[in-house]
Image: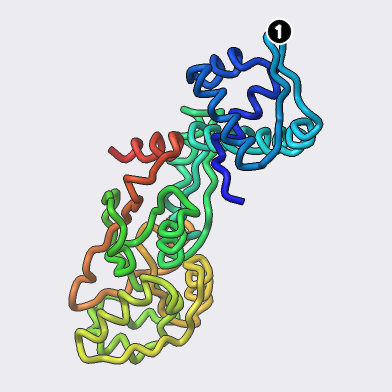
Amino acid sequence: MDINYELYKVFYHVASTLSFSEASKQLFISQSAVSQSIKTLERKLDQVLFIRSTKKVQLTPEGEILLRHIEPAMHLIQRGESQLLDAASTGGQIGASDTICRYFLVPYLKKFHEAFPNAHIKVVNQTSIKCVELLESGQVDLIVVNYPNSYLSNVSSIKKIKKFHDVFIANQDFAELKGKKLSYQELSKYPILMLDKHSTTSEYLHRLFQQHQLDLVPEIELTSNDLLIDLARIGLGIAFIPNFCLSEQTCDLFAVQTEEELPERELVIAYNEQVLTSKAAKEFLSFFD
């Protein structure tokens, strides 16, 4: 049975107040409109829902049955609307990789929490490629990802927030490479440790080698830059990581230089402006203006 939700909404207010005039005030419509809606609902259901008199309005037994079902449904709808409004004003979801969260986002999350202690930002950890999928499906409000990123073609807004270079790092087992500048062909002869094929970093490095007519065959592919650093530290190969992952804890490693400077990349915030409703997400985005 196809009955407009607005008719049930009018019924609920009349049944709750037992007053056509009070229902009209709550709904901000005329009393005649309320009366017409009830008549339409009764006609569609082929049931009399109210007993009307000059002094009062009463529910019929059929009206009481309907109210028992409509009332909890209305409460569920109202609760859902309330939760959506609360989420829009106090919550937001950000998608980012583990590396970007750990080495870049943490200070901004701390700053946001200090400025808005009652707001809640949830961070969803995924690769930059998977983050785009989360954004397009509406599961997150915005994402912080590596750029260039071919998967961002359908995203309406991209804000560039940080430039960085990638770097090859190794331990003292490769000390003979210190002070040298290797061609990509020479570098390809060494065991390369890098992120797996489900990352924009993997796409970027493979494309870079392909531009030099070289086929890159990594020794090890992982999902974590931290693990790549750990494996480079024990001499399993030369790791390829973003330079913002370097810290005092990596001082036992050295950068392997290349003849050609590695192209610059960027971190960007991507979002769909027309559907960015979360106030918390908008406030977080403003930190990068």
In the displayed image of the protein, which residue is found farthest to the top?
Answer: 55
Residue displayed at 50% across by 62% down? 126
The quarter of the displayed image where residue 277 is located: top left
Judge from the rendering whether residue 48 lies leftward or rightward of residue 223; answer left or right: right
Front-lying residue, 65 or 194: 65
Residue 203's place in the image compared with 123, above or below, is: below
Judge from the rendering whether residue 67 lies leftward or rightward of residue 248; answer left or right: right
Q: What SS does tag 1 mark?
A: loop
Q: Tag 1: Cα neighbours inside 10 Å, few (<14), some, or many (≥20)?
A: few
Q: How is the image coloured?
A: rainbow
Can the viewer see residue 255 in this picture?
yes
Residue 128's place in the image compared with 205, above or below, is: above
Judge from the rendering whether residue 138 lies leftward or rightward of residue 156; answer left or right: right
Residue displayed at 28% across by 53% down? 156
Q: Which residue in the protein does label 1 denote?
A: 55
Judge from the rendering whether residue 32 lies leftward or rightward of residue 16; answer left or right: left
In the displayed image of the protein, which residue is found farthest to the right?
Answer: 61
Residue displayed at 56% across by 39% down? 5
Q: Amino acid at mark 1?
A: Lys
Front-lying residue, 57 or 207: 57
Q: Position of residue 135 (x, y in %)?
A: 42, 56
Residue displayed at 77% across by 35% down? 62
Q: Position of residue 78 (x, y in %)?
A: 61, 33
Q: Position of residue 158 (x, y in %)?
A: 28, 52
